[in-house]
Amino acid sequence: QSALTQPASVSGSPDQSITISCTGTSSDIGTFRLVSWYQQHPGKAPKLLISEVTKRPSGVSDRFSGFKSGNTASLTISGLQAEDEADYYCCSYAGRSTWVFGGGTKLTVV
Amino acid sequence: QVQLRESGPGLVKPSETLSLTCTVSAASLSSYYWSWIRQPPGKGLEWIGYIYDDGSANYNPSLKSRITISADTSKNQFSLNLIAVTAADTALYYCARANASHAFDVWGQGTMVTVSS
């Protein structure tokens, strides 16, 4: 069970859009539509942003959207705001009652 | 709303056992995967394992030989035991709830555990 692959960092300017990729395998992302995304600010617990590839929990801004194609999932943040600066993690159910996380992506809003 | 709170020693000696408890408020231990997740300093998240409401549990294959997760429904708590710890087990340990969508929708605030003599 290997960690999902995310870029270490991405950056964008206010009001721009950015996309964070998350690459897995045919055993996890490729098989299950059970990809979730989390936002983590420094010193805070992760917060669920997206579940089941595209679904936003109540209270999460519609500026956050998810997508999946093949073994790769992605998170897009539109209309970047300073408060979006954080670490972002993808996660996939990997079958046999296991989960796997990505290594995390640091988003800088410049 | 549902709240989770981790508790346990912040310092564990190498080769000893790390034991943490997660207390669940405003919900019972039913119909969810009650999980442990850890984050080494400056690093990413790692899923450790879960216990389900029927008492079944499953663990990260890389840690499976050293982990036990159990639950005490009378106290609305679930616990993590990790044996034979090393410095590599130093991390911020979170308890979290995975829902029917297999997403972790509720998290504790985390508890830092340092393995050192």
Image: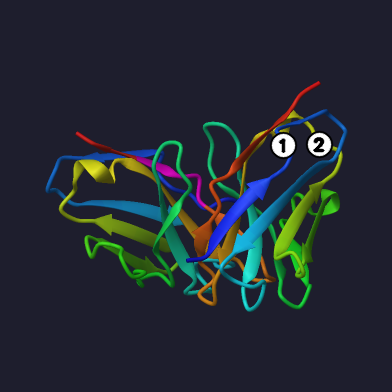
Q: Nearer the viewer, residue A1 or B11?
A: B11
Q: Chain of mark 1?
A: B
Q: Nearer the viewer, residue A58 or B15?
A: A58
Q: Which image quarter: residue B23?
A: bottom right
Quadrant in which the C terminus of chain A is drawn: top left
Say which mark, if any, is on residue B89.
1
Q: Left or right of B110: which side holds A66?
A: left
Q: Left or right of A28: which side holds B34?
A: right
Answer few, some or many: residues within 10 Å of disc 2's Cα (few below 14, many 20 plus, some between 14 and 19).
Answer: some
Residue range of the region highlighted in magenta in the rendering: A102-106
Quadrant in which the N terminus of chain A is drawn: bottom right
Q: What amino acid is labelled 2 in the image?
A: Val
Give yes or no for contact between labels 2 and 1 (Cβ–Cβ under 8 Å). Answer: yes
The CA distance from mark 2 to mark 1 is: 6 Å
The image shows residue B76 at horizontal and vertical percentages of: 70, 65
Q: Chain of mark 2?
A: B
Q: Report which residue position mark 2 lands on.
A: B85
Q: Secondary structure at mark 1?
A: helix
Check residue B27 for magenta coloring.
no
Q: Residue at x 58, y 64 (%)?
A: B97
Q: What amino acid is labelled 1 in the image?
A: Asp
**Could you tell me if residue A85 is visible in this image?**
yes
Q: Residue at x 33, y 58 (%)?
A: A75
Q: Is residue B82 above or below residue B112?
A: below
**Could you tell me if residue A1 is visible in this image?**
no
Q: Left or right of B70: which side holds B107?
A: left
Q: Nearer the viewer, residue A57 or A29?
A: A57
Q: Are marks 2 and 1 on the same chain?
A: yes
Q: Residue at x 74, y 50 (%)?
A: B62
Q: Is residue A7 above or below residue B42?
A: below
Which residue appears farthest toward the top when viewing the image?
Answer: B117
The image shows residue A90 at horizontal and vertical percentages of: 45, 55
